[in-house]
Amino acid sequence: MIKSIASRLAAELNVREAQVLATVELIDEGATVPFIARYRKEVTGGLDDTQLRLLDERLVYLRELDARRDTILKSIAEQDKLSPELQAAILEADNKTLLEDLYLPYKPKRRTRAQIAREAGLEPLADSLLADPSQEPEAAAAAYIAPDKGVADAKAALDGARAILIERFAEDAALLGVLRDKLWQEGELSGSVVAGKEAEGAKFSDYFAHREPIRSTPSHRALALLRGRNEGILTLGLKYQPDETPITERSAYELLIARHFAVADQGRAADKWLLDGVRLCWRAKIFLSFELELLGRLKDAADAEAIKVFAGNLHDLLLAAPAGARATMGLDPGIRTGVKVAVVDATGKLLDTATVYPHEPRRDWHGALSTLAALAVRHQVDLIAIGNGTASRETDKLAEELTRALPQLAMTRVVVSEAGASVYSASELAAREFPTLDVSLRGAVSIARRLQDPLAELVKIDPKSIGVGQYQHDVNQSQLAKSLDAVVEDCVNAVGVDVNMASVPLLTRISGLNATLAANIVAYRDANGAFKSRKALLKVPRLGEKTFEQAAGFLRIRGGDNPLDASSVHPEAYPVVEKIVSRTGRAVSELISDAGAIKTLRPSDYTDARFGLPTVMDILKELEKPGRDPRPEFKTATFQDGIEDIKHLLPGMVLEGCVTNVTNFGAFVDIGVHQDGLVHISALSNKFVDDPRTVVKAGDVVQVKVLEVDVARKRIALTMRMSDEPGAQRSSAPAGRSDASRSGKGRAPEKAPANNAMADALARLKR
């Protein structure tokens, strides 16, 4: 059914069906998204990597849907119950929920009360009372008493008939769809504290008596509520009508069921019996099922949003500006255990290590300074990378004094995130790379390298350990891993890698490669020396033509035999460059980087049956700036001297900081006091902001003003709106609810929430 799938994908993506069919064929042949996006633009009609990722994801879903559809059709046909109308409905079902609703009456199940009642011959009684409610139920049931079939009296007969009707009501696909949508639109998520858990669950105190529409519950709040339930602190449920509604009053949902089956209270003998069946059907069967289903739907939506936020932050962090190939000293701050020091050369190769003790209890400041100075001079250090953990500002002071003592080196010191460094230090990869190096010193190496090239170093760490997500341990782990892996793959291939310097983890992320092939490339490089050309990669064991096609364009060989091998021009497109060289009469080495000459060329002059205008234009752009790096220019935040602890902050201070994390409700900024401050979404800009990432990204250097400080709770409220006045009246919405309506389009920007609300939002994220 690929044709119908292609039609649906085309409609969802708002592209032509031919584009979808061509892309699906490439995916089925094993092509990766980065390869298709970069080198098959003519085939796909120019679909970008975002469209391709969505297409790939939806393709899997729709194929699973079709497989399930075939299974259901076969099952119902085997029961000899597949009518033309039912078959048509199943074939038209466009989602798994509707498909399962249609299958529900025919799905093999354990013997139910309704099935037992049918076997006892009670279905005609149920049909009769439903069709003619004027009958007296007990009188009608008398004819169905059959002790030998387990129907001892009229009451037993009526109970069995009601079970049949309840099952029938609860398995009507059209009705279920209406009820489900209504409950999702109108239902309220209710949270309450488990009796006796108030003290133990203080961190969830905002939700001890919580209620809000389930459909608009934001991701971070939904995940907090679900975590509270999982930890046994909260009970969660759905409310579908006000608490004060009398229990005897029929809900709108019961009335919908009754109307659908023509049940009404008209004073007839069987009306009450039928309506009681409707009530039982809703309250004891349908609602309970929907409550579980919609809480699951909320969880899925919350997971998807949290994963999206995490993926976006990871993307920004991986593509943060690299400081470049410069000799770097990494400092992993510590107090009692000392500051771990590692010096790496411009390629990231470890040159030297040391441990110094400038802080308490030893307080050997001069000895530490002397050791660092000797290392800096010996290895001509250009950069100093300081981890942002405990004692980072104190260690930054040491580094500052070092730079003043050695002005001839003109060293630049930078505080960098050390999130995940300890994970790398204890990893098998680090142990293989540095088998004799102390684990603590490996962290200093990682800190130094991540300043040189964040992408190359961070790919060695599980993305979940990098610290730019919210509730990453609560979301669906397989979906999270898949999404983050896709981000890493896209980022690595967008930048490309130097095949003669890249590590195994970095090469593993290249299109078409895996861990085995990456290891084979490094082993071949170690045994035979640097690769001189891309073609030489075909000599690597198990690296065949298909893999070469997928990977070659993303692998760079600098200083090799062919200058094009250092560019993103794919080897398959070299004939296009040869055509350009032939017509211009200039060698490739002369043409590269000559922007003036390249701009005089008309791309249409070099197209042919295989390489269309998009590819030729990409080639000319690459020739103009070969091996261009899509990452921004390197710059750093300068922390204010004397502001090293949260106690030093005062409302009104204007400081420079670095964005460490972006969420749906704002951005967290490191201002050098060992505690990130929160810029609430309403304080990011003077204009209305719907998505914080449209204003800031992880790694951005920003200027912020301190609004409020809670030293006891280590909470800092910041603003990027310099006109905001500290201490001004702000929303007093309960913690965790201050951003409940942020997604509403057209709303006027709200004031930043009070410090307690903002602080608790921060606390929930950090949990």
Image (tube, rainbow, N blue to C red):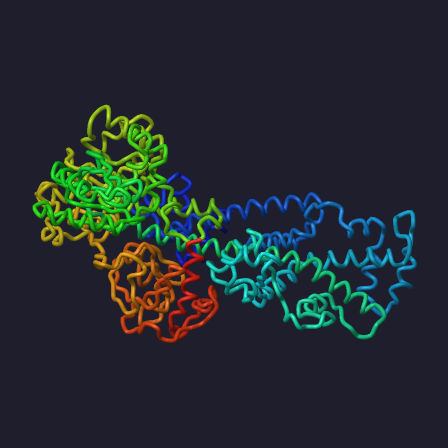
Kindly identify the residue that appears in the image at 56 percent across and 66 percent down: 211
- Place of residue 686 in the rendered image (x, y in percent of width and height, measured from the top left): 31, 72
* Quadrant housing residue 266: bottom right
Kindly identify the residue that appears in the image at 63 percent across and 46 percent down: 72
* Foreground residue among 113 and 143: 113
* Quadrant housing residue 764: bottom left
- Place of residue 624 in the rendered image (x, y in percent of width and height, measured from the top left): 15, 49
| Total marks placed | 0
* Foreground residue among 664 and 643: 643
* Foreground residue among 684 and 139: 684
- Place of residue 559 in the rendered image (x, y in percent of width and height, measured from the top left): 14, 36
Task: Answer with left or right where residue 220 lies relative to residue 583.
Answer: right
- Place of residue 92 in the rendered image (x, y in percent of width and height, measured from the top left): 57, 55
Q: Is residue 532 above or below residue 330?
A: above
* Quadrant housing residue 367: top left
Kindly identify the residue that appears in the image at 12 percent across and 45 percent down: 592
